[in-house]
Each structure stands twice: as structure tokens, then as C-alpha cells.
């Protein structure tokens, strides 16, 4: 990278963030070692395998994290953990069936079952963990996994609160574990258009960037739901974790008879709604294109509609506006097309997933004619990224990149501080929804300026023994 390009990348970044960003960029100037083919390593040699434990084996685990990880021959899923014993047993069956089909041997691995992730983390055979749990169960298991010496793949969003996210980032950096967040828009499989869009923006193909427009759907409200008996197979107190006790009803947790979209996604007690649920993806893409991966906004304002009654109480329709120190404004709303639009003084680029969904319930484009990558001028999209231009980290596939980095001990495409900053930008916007006034955020100190009320919302009370 030329000195000129380095100045462009690090303009407006603090010394601390400069050092962190330098480490990220430096890590990308080397070719991440290609994973040795199983035929060379001996595909059935246990000593060559990365032994993995899965914490949470529900919808996202079965449809995404497990299949995307186990397709690599040098992995061995040796343990599953879930607070729902029925799902835990079905998770083991899923793995056994996978190996029966792929290896011709249903007993290829003796998959151990755990009802408590802390017991799983004591298993010294486990090298790494997949954490595919509800949002309120992200930070604590990841921190404990890092302390136990395990590498971590964590489903987004990074944390329930900004305080949890900071604690997680500090723990990962302190222990030196390899961490990947599930921001798979950073990997070219299955969506090469996101990296392409961000590289074009970073290299000035639309001129000076001034606005980023993000489209995110909201969630509908629901009816009141009656208290129900807690299923014998569910450790409900453990499922609630650090959050306060509320009565059990099936639509508050997850379906007992299938793996469809769980109700907790619409309960503020367990997550912030779509602002983090999908905002973690699109805001991360925006940060990648803006070059603000290790910082955050300095000014935020938002308005949102919240249900007045019913079990499901996350935000519905909303508008949020965030301003960054580099002068770029980010606008987020469900009124915008689902995706990310970068606007510069010489044109615009729009990028979206199109009609591809990771899970059946993912929101996809309702416009079949909408392009997954579009620009104000087709010539922009044909522009070549030259050897002296900025080249962003290349990752073929999110889980594969994590596994490659476990072997090489290099930084992943979506490391913990980057993940925390994307999530915290979403959470700051969520706080602004609750306090309909302009908030002034200090991304260095991670505090609101002169606003004690807003600062009390950086964390939530945590129920014993689940405290950080």
C-alpha cells in the first residue's frame, strides 16, 4: 500500500484505533495459508482434525452453522450443548446422520451431550466452539470459552449491550483466541458483491463518500400470550440466563415441535430487534465501505414505533440517523430498500443480498428486478482495483475463514473488535429510539457525552450467577 493510500485509510482514526487497524490491514497483506487437503493430511486422522463443540443446536445451528462448518473434512463435531434436552438429542442425531452419509459411518464420532456449556468447556479435547444461541446468550459463553482456551465462532449480534460487547472484545484480545462473528456478508461465498462494493467505495470510485443509506425491516407486534407449563425438556431458568424471570410461554422462547423462527427474536428482554438482528450485517458492511470498522458514530438520533401491548415488544417502523467523525451520515430505516447504498459526490453504489436467504425466514428483496449490485453509472462496477489500490481482506467463506485462521493463528475477516463496533453502532441507535433526542457518542470512551440517562442504558441488570 502506498503512503498516500495509507493516509486515506487512517484519516481521522485515533492512535489506538490506528494500531488496531494496522494489525488488521497487515494481517491481510499476507496470503492466509490454504487449508491442506484431507487427502494429504489423512482425512480420518484425529490428530489433524479441529475438534468442535456446538453451543446451541437450534434453527440457525442446524440450517447454517453446523453444515457450513462440517463440510470441511478436517473438522470433527464431538459435542453438542443445549438447554433443551430434546433439541440436544436431535442435535446429536443430526451430527450422527451427517457422518453416516458423509463418512459411511454413523459412529465416526461419539458425540457427547451437555446441558450446561460450562461443563462442555471443561472438555480438553474441544479446540473450538460454535455459539448459535439467542442474543442474550452470546457474550457470556464466548467470554467463558476464551478463558477456557477455545477459539470461537459467534452468531451475530455480538452482544445484548455495549458493556457486554466491550467485555467480550477485551477478553478475546487478552486471551489471544481466534474469533469470528457471523457477518457472512464479508465473505465472497455466497455474496461477492459486498466486498466488491466496499472496495469500489474505499477506492473513491463514487468520489467523496457523504451518505450511507441502509434499509432494514421491522418486526410486527403480537398478541398477549398466556402462561404455559414449562416443558420437562427445557431448563427454562438456564435459558433466561442473566435476564429477569418472566413466566414461560412457548412464543417467548422457541417452538417445541419444529425449528421455525423463534419468538424471542421479538422480545426486547432477549434482543433489540431488527436494528441488531439484521443491522449487525448491514451496518458492518457500511463500516467496511466507510473505513470506520474500529470506531463509531459521534452523533445519533432516532424515532421508532413500539407496540403498546402484546408479548412481542421490539421496535417496528423506525428511522435512525448517525453522523461519523469523518463527516459521513448513515441513515437507517425500514422505508429504504433492504441493503446498503453508498452515496458520493460522483455517484452511488447499492448492494444487497438479492433473493438469497441463509434461513427460510430471512427477509429478502421483494423486487425481483432489483440488482444485488447496482450503481449510478455501469462503468463504476466495471472499474478495476489496481495493485496500488486498497484491497480489502479476502475470505472465501465465513466458517472456512475461521477454520483457516485457527490453523494459521492469523486474524479473521470479522474479528472481535470489528464485530463489537458494528454491534455497538446498532445499540447506540436503539438507545436513541428509546430517548427521542439527539445523543452525542464518544466512540473512544464508549460513553454518551453529558447524558447520564443514556449512559445507564449501556448495560442491563444481570441476574446471578450470570454476571460479567
Image (cartoon, rainbow, N blue to C red):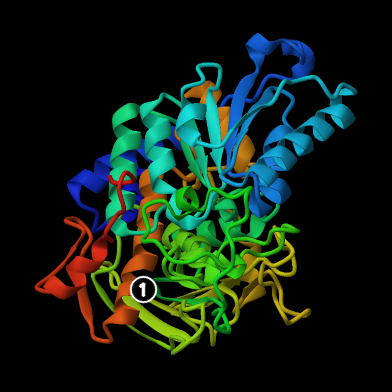
Residue at image point 89% right, 31% down: 101
Specify the quadrant of the image occupied by residue 445.
bottom left
Residue that label 1 marks? 430
Secondary element at image label 1: helix
Residue 328 visible? The answer is no
Q: Nearer the viewer, residue 461 or 26?
A: 461
Above/below status of 397 relative to 328: above
Decide if residue 77 is on the left or right side of residue 313: right
Q: Nearer the viewer, residue 197 or 77?
A: 77
Above/below status of 62 relative to 299: above
Check the image and name the residue furthest to the left.
Answer: 450
Q: Is the C terminus in the top left, top right, bottom left or bottom right quadrant?
A: top left
Above/below status of 330 relative to 85: below
Specify the quadrant of the image occupied by residue 397.
top right
Q: Position of residue 262 (x, y in %)?
A: 62, 64
Residue at image point 46% right, 51% down: 237
Q: Position of residue 29 (x, y in %)?
A: 46, 34
Above/below status of 410 relative to 184: above
Q: Is the N terminus in the top left, top right, bottom left or bottom right quadrant?
A: top left
Amino acid at each position: 500500500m502506498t503512503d498516500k493510500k495509507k493516509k486515506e485509510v487512517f484519516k481521522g482514526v485515533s492512535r489506538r484505533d490506528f494500531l488496531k487497524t494496522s494489525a488488521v490491514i497487515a494481517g491481510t497483506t499476507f496470503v492466509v495459508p490454504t487449508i491442506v487437503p484431507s487427502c494429504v493430511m489423512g482425512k480420518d486422522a484425529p490428530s489433524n482434525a479441529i475438534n468442535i463443540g456446538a453451543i446451541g443446536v437450534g434453527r440457525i445451528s442446524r440450517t447454517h452453522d453446523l453444515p457450513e462448518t462440517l463440510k470441511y473434512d478436517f473438522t470433527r463435531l464431538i459435542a453438542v450443548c443445549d438447554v433443551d434436552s430434546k433439541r440436544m438429542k436431535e442435535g446429536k442425531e443430526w451430527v450422527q446422520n451427517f457422518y453416516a452419509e458423509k463418512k459411511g459411518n454413523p459412529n465416526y464420532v461419539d458425540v457427547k451431550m451437555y446441558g450446561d456449556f460450562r461443563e462442555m468447556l471443561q472438555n480438553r479435547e474441544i479446540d473450538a466452539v460454535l455459539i448459535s444461541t439467542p442474543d442474550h446468550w452470546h457474550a457470556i459463553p464466548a467470554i467463558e470459552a476464551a478463558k477456557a482456551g477455545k477459539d470461537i465462532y459467534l452468531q451475530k449480534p455480538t452482544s445484548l449491550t455495549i458493556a457486554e460487547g466491550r467485555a467480550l472484545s477485551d477478553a478475546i484480545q487478552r486471551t489471544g483466541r481466534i474469533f469470528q462473528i457471523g457477518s457472512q456478508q464479508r465473505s465472497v461465498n455466497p455474496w461477492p458483491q459486498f466486498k466488491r462494493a466496499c472496495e469500489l467505495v474505499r477506492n473513491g470510485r463514487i468520489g467523496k463518500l457523504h451518505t450511507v443509506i441502509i434499509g432494514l425491516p421491522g418486526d410486527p407486534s403480537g398478541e398477549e400470550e398466556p402462561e404455559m407449563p414449562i416443558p420437562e425438556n427445557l431448563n427454562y431458568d438456564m435459558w433466561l440466563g442473566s435476564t429477569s424471570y418472566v413466566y414461560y410461554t412457548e412464543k417467548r422462547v422457541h417452538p417445541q415441535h419444529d425449528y421455525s423462527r423463534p419468538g424471542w427474536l421479538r422480545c426486547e428482554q432477549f434482543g433489540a430487534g431488527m436494528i441488531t438482528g439484521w443491522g449487525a450485517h448491514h451496518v458492518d458492511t457500511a463500516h467496511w465501505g466507510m473505513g470506520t470498522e474500529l470506531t463509531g458514530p459521534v452523533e445519533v438520533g432516532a424515532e421508532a414505533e413500539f407496540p403498546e401491548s402484546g408479548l412481542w415488544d421490539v421496535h417496528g417502523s423506525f428511522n435512525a440517523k448517525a453522523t461519523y467523525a469523518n463527516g459521513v451520515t448513515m441513515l437507517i430505516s425500514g422505508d429504504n430498500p433492504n441493503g446498503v447504498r453508498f452515496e458520493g459526490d460522483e455517484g452511488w453504489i447499492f448492494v444487497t443480498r438479492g433473493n438469497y436467504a441463509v434461513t427460510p425466514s430471512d427477509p429478502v428483496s421483494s423486487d425481483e428486478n432489483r440488482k444485488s449490485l447496482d450503481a449510478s453509472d455501469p462503468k463504476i462496477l466495471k472499474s478495476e482495483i489496481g495493485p496500488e489500490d486498497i484491497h480489502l481482506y479476502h475470505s472465501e467463506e465465513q466458517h472456512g475463514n475461521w477454520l483457516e485462521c485457527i490453523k494459521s493463528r492469523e486474524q479473521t475477516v470479522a474479528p472481535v473488535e470489528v464485530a463489537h463496533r458494528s454491534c455497538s453502532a446498532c445499540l447506540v441507535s436503539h438507545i436513541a429510539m428509546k430517548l427521542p433526542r439527539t445523543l452525542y457518542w464518544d466512540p473512544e470512551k464508549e460513553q454518551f457525552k453529558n447524558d447520564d440517562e443514556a449512559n445507564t442504558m449501556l448495560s442491563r441488570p444481570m441476574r446471578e450467577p450470570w454476571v460479567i
